[in-house]
Structure formats: structure tokens, C-alpha cells
Amino acid sequence: MPSFQRAARDALANTQQRRNLAHATATIRAKRERVVGEVDRWEDLRVAGAEAKDEALHHLPDYLEQLEANLTARGATVHWARDADEANAIVLGLIRDKGADEVVKVKSMLTQEIELNERLEEAGIHAWETDLAELIVQLGHDRPSHILVPAIHRNRAEIREIFLREMGSVGRPAPKDLTDEPAKLAEAARLHLREKFLRAKVAISGANFAVADTGTLVVVESEGNGRMCLTLPETLISLVGVEKVLPTFADLGPMLQLLPRSSTGERMNPYTSMWTGVTPGDGPQEVHVVLVDNGRSRVLADEVGRQALRCIRCSACLNVCPVYERAGGHAYGSVYPGPIGAVLNPLLRGTGSEVDKSLPYASSLCGACFEACPVRIDIPQLLVHMRTQVVDEASGRSPEALGMKAAAWTFADHRRLETAQRASSLSGRLLGNRTVRSVPGLGAWTQARDVPTPPKETFRQWWRRTHEDES
Amino acid sequence: MSSSQSTPLTGTERTSVLPGTGLTVALFATCFNDTLWPEAPRATVTLLERLGCRVVFPREQTCCGQMFTNTGYADDATPLVRKFVDTFERFDHVVAPSGSCVGSVREQHAMLARRSGDDGLLQAVEQTAPRVRELSELLVDVLGVTDVGAYFPHRTTYHPTCHSLRMLHVGDRPLQLLRAVRGIDLVELPSATECCGFGGTFAVKNADTSIAMGADKARHVRGTGAEVLVAGDNSCLAHIGGVLGRQRSGVRTLHLAQVLASTEEDPA
Ligand code: SF4
């Protein structure tokens, strides 16, 4: 992956995408603000949500064992996966045992994170996404660019084109007279998906929450397609990140208020599905739960960084982020875009690669993300923390590092600062007026902005001239 | 304070009331303002003296370390934290005409001290940092004034900078102060709370995104028809002003302190 800066520059040139993103995020931002404003004790809810997640994270092994015991007691089979390879291998083995060559899928960030669809495809198994937006992304041979609205970068006309072009090659074709009316597009998707729901023997899901004290998994969604996957097939395989665990069923209370209001701007989400193991004669008769680590224990070990594991993937931080709004999701180089992606990706993967080194800098630190986050993740603090890690791991001999050293030396003593100021105000005097059009070395900085030159008299010179005698 | 507070004050009486009489305030000019935009700390001094405060400028001061901290150079920032407390810990009131520098002192100095493992430094920071205030906080909370007797007869719009808004939670204090300025035609800025795109090194490291954000902010400013854009942070103003200047928009940028210091006799 290229660095964020490079990817963002390309994305900024895509004016259609910029318009789509600006429109979509502004709409959802306004909706969210309205419904959050309705709740008197929103701050208390945020604290309750953060505390429930922290309790789970601080005693993670205990709650995971409790979850496993309760799931097993209720007829589910629990598997553990250390990383993406192990998780994919477990899922592949289970599907092969069933002799299936296709699966239906509930939208899941974790399966994207471990690239499950790609691995299944290589093994000759078709994985059909059933979430409307995921379907658009899958049919468009595209990558999601938003946690909640993966096709946020597409408009209706583009979606119509994708449906007409692609649906026929993987199942029921779109009607020839398809228009770009939302209802017509939704109907085409419904008909296309219906035959897949009815045929599939195996379904794959993630989970929004996994309750330790009851062994209950929870999926929250808007369309009902997820519920079709969770109830129709004979076998259900759920991949769950270890950070999804909640201590008690009561903890769902704040969560199910925080999540829909923060994510879609709704008071309640249309579909909340909960299942606890296997119920004879009702729903899937074989339930597998794969508990996946894939870098999460590494995040947990970082005392400052671990709060990122509280994330409930509501995407509120994306929708309020001015950088995300302009650069789009793809620039973040992973399934987790936006402010949370800028910290979570380098936390999960380390800061070795170009993109992971650049992500902590993909923010102006404006703080809008922290203000919006329903579980109070201090993303600006985490960004600074990860920047420090990037700098600490570097050689310390980059031009930037040397510049910082020199500046720190100057600031260590006011007499050095005064000497430096004399030199810069001298250059200011030589330049005469207070505006320069370009400064060598600052490059893009001055491309679109005028830069002031130093004034003829610094503040401290003025102070000495006007006040020094008195004090 | 005067006992005739119940009667509305006229312009001349206003300046005769000195809410801060006797109060000593240490000025943290900030390295950026000291070197590049001395008008803001100068206006801060003029204003506070007009309000009856004794202003002190400890010469040993340099920089709060914000640029180092926010770019990831925590090791280079820590000695500056030490220098900051050494310079300012003896004062009850410290003021800086910069929301982001005050934000850095109040929100990040403790983090840096903790990271350095120096308990003495952490203690000194915890004593000093809460006494460091942004200009509008000092005026409204400590001096208890919103009408500072300023005169500024111009169509003006106000950009609440991110750090003032979300780190310091200054709320509408700057607007309370601006609304009380005589002659001002204060117009609301659309999407005011959205970041201007400066963000320190962000403007250099992600120049394209930064400029896209700055251009939108400049468009909103021009849409108000204001002659003057006001904010409490010169770095944001320089960024937006840089875009406005390149567009030859004719909009002036002024620091909040300059507007509040402006009078009929000495206009900004
Ligand atoms: S970080 Fe917070 S706001 Fe962002 S997706 Fe996660 S829970 Fe939502």
C-alpha cells in the first residue's frame, strides 16, 4: 500500500467521489447530531459503554473462557485462531466438511480484515455478500471505503450500472428496465439475493457483541438480510474478534442505545438478532464460533493504545472527520478507515510499513472524532502516541529529526531563541513586505497559501523597548 | 469593583471600571507569536493593562513544545515542559493568546512528564498547567468581564479553532466578548466548528488534504461577506489567511486580542 499522503492525493483528484462523500457524511452527521441531542444523559451512556468494554478488556482471558464455556454448554462449538491464516483455515475446513461450494455472508469487518472471501475464492468456494452495500462493492470488484456504508463513495447511477453489468454473471440478472430509484435498486438486490439465501447450506457472520455470562452473540443491522443468513442455513459459522466480548447481558443496554444513534442516526436499529448456541428444530442446527486474535493481544499490551479495542465500529468518527471526508476510505489502506483506522491499523499491524507509518499523521488533531465516539476513545491522544512510536523507531537521522533537534536546541534557552529571531527578522527586513509566495523546502505548503515573513520587531524586542525600564 | 454596577455603563465609564485592578498576569507570548505575529501578544498586553492588570513577561520563556509533541518527538518536547514550569510556576495567572498552545500545556504536559518518569516534574506540571489560560478564559472567568470597552466598526466573522473548542472547551466565551464590542457587525460563519486544515505539521505532511480543507473554510468565510476573520490562534489564521490571500479575497485576518484591544483612539 502507498502512504496515506499519496493515496489521498489521488483520491482528492476524484471530484465525483469527493462530492458523494461530502454529501453522504453531511447527511448522516446531521441525523446523528439530532438523535444524540435527544438523549439527556448521553454522556452517562458513553461512560457506561466505555466502562463495560474496559471491564471486559482488563479481564479478557477470564471473560473469554466464560464465553467459551457458555457457548459450549448451549451446543455451539468454539474454535480459537491466533491470526488470519488460522481463522481462514478453520472456516475452510468447516465448509469442506459440509461439502458446500458456496456460502452466504452477513456483513463483517473481521472477515474483511482476514481476507476470508479471497481465501475462499482461491479454494473454489463462492462467498456471497448479502448486505446491500457490501453487495455493491463485491459486484463492482471494489473495496469498501466506509465501515457502515461500504459503498458511500458510489452514487445511484453508478450502482445501477454495476447491477446491470454484473448481476447476471453470478446469479439472477438485474431487470433490463432498472432505473436508479432507490426502491428499484433495492428490489433488484432482493431478488438477486433471494435465490442465494434459499440455496445456501452454510452462512458466515461476524458479531457486534458476544455476551460472556450467557454465551449470546448479537448482530445489529438495518436490512434484515443478516437475519436471513442467521436463520435459514443449516450451519452457521461466526467469526468474532476477541475484543467483542461484553461481561454481562445487562451491558447490552447502553450498547444498543449508543450504537444505532452513533452509526445510522436512528433511535433503534431495525434488526437486532441474538442467538445463544443451538435451538433444536429452530435455526441453524450446527453453530461454530471462531474467536480471533489477529493482533488484538498486541494492542492490549499497549497501555495507552488498548482503549482502541473499545471500538464498536459505529463509524461516527469517520462521518465527522474532515480528513476522511476529503480523502475517502481507500486512502487508509485497510478495512478500518477514518480516525479509528488511523490508530487501529498501526496498533494491530505495527508501524513497519509505509502506510502504517503514515497513518498516525493522517489527522489534523482537530478532536471531532473523540467528541463523537460513543465509547470515548481518545483518538487524538492515540494518534500522538503512535506518532511517538513511529519517531522512536526511526533512525533519528532524517532531515525532519535533525530539524527538530536543532529547533529543540534553540528553544532550550531564550538567548538562543533571541539570536535566531534576530536572524529571521533580518531576512524579514530584506524581504520588505510581509508576504512571500514561495519558500524553498516547504514545497506544497506554499503552493496554495501565502506565507507571512517575519516582522521587523519581535514581541520581546517590543516588550524591552516599551516595558523593560519599569520592571 | 464599582458599586454602581446596576446602571448600564457608557463608553467612557466603561474604561474607568478596572476589573483586574492589582491582578498580576504572566504573559506566555508563545514562540510563534513572539517571532512571527507579535501583534497578538502586544494587543493582549494593551488590553490587560487597560483592564487594570499588571502584566509580566518572563524573559526566560520560549516554547510549549506543541510542535514536537504533536509530531511525535516526545523526547525533544520534555525539556521544554521543564523549562515552561520553571518559568511560570511562580505565577497564579498565566495567559497566552493561543488556544492550541494552552491546549498543549493543559492536555499534554502531564502526559510528557509521566512518560519521562520524573515525578517532581509531573507534580510541578499538575500545579502549573491549570493556571494557564487562553485569553477569553482569563477575561470571562478570572476578570469576570465580557464588555472590555472595545470599538471595532467592521463586518466580522469568527472561526472557533479546534483546540479552543474541543481541548479547552472555551465555548462561546470569545463570542460573548465579541458581541459586546461597539460598532461590530458580527456575522455567523457556516460550518464554523469544522477544522481549517492547519494542524501543525499536518499542513506540511498532508499538504493536499490540508489545502482542500483550507479552501472550504475560505469559501465559507467569503460567503459571509465579512471584511475581517477573527480567531484565537494565529497559526489557524495564517493558514486560512494564506489561502484567502492567495485568492486575493481582500479579507483581513485578526487575532481576537487585536479586536478586543481596538479602540476609537487606537483602532486595529
Ligand atoms: S472509534 Fe468510536 S466513533 Fe469510531 S467507529 Fe469506533 S466506536 Fe465508533
Image: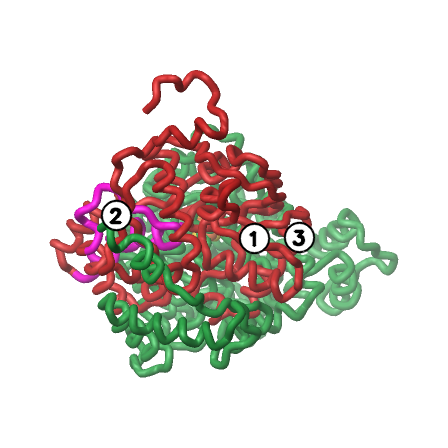
Chain colours: A green, B red
Q: Quadrant of residue B62?
A: bottom left
Looking at the image, which is closer to me, B156 or A389? B156
In screen coordinates, is A22 left or right of B129? right
The quadrant of the image that shows the N terminus of chain B is top left
The verdict on label 1 being within 8 Å of ligand 1 is no
- Magenta stretch: give its range: B87-116
Which residue occupies 37% across, 51% down? Answer: A378
**Of the numbered discs in the image, which one, if any, rests on residue A258?**
none
Q: Amino acid at mark 1?
A: Leu
Query: Can residue B99 be seen by looking at this rendering?
Result: yes
Query: Can residue A285 be seen by looking at this rendering?
Result: no
Marks 1 and 3: which is nearer the front? 3
- Asked if residue B98 is among those painted magenta in the image, a careful observer would answer yes
Residue farthest right in this picture: A177
Residue under label 3, please give it. Answer: B222
Chain of the residue on which disc 1 is drawn: A
Q: Amino acid at mark 2?
A: Ala
Q: Amino acid at mark 3?
A: Arg
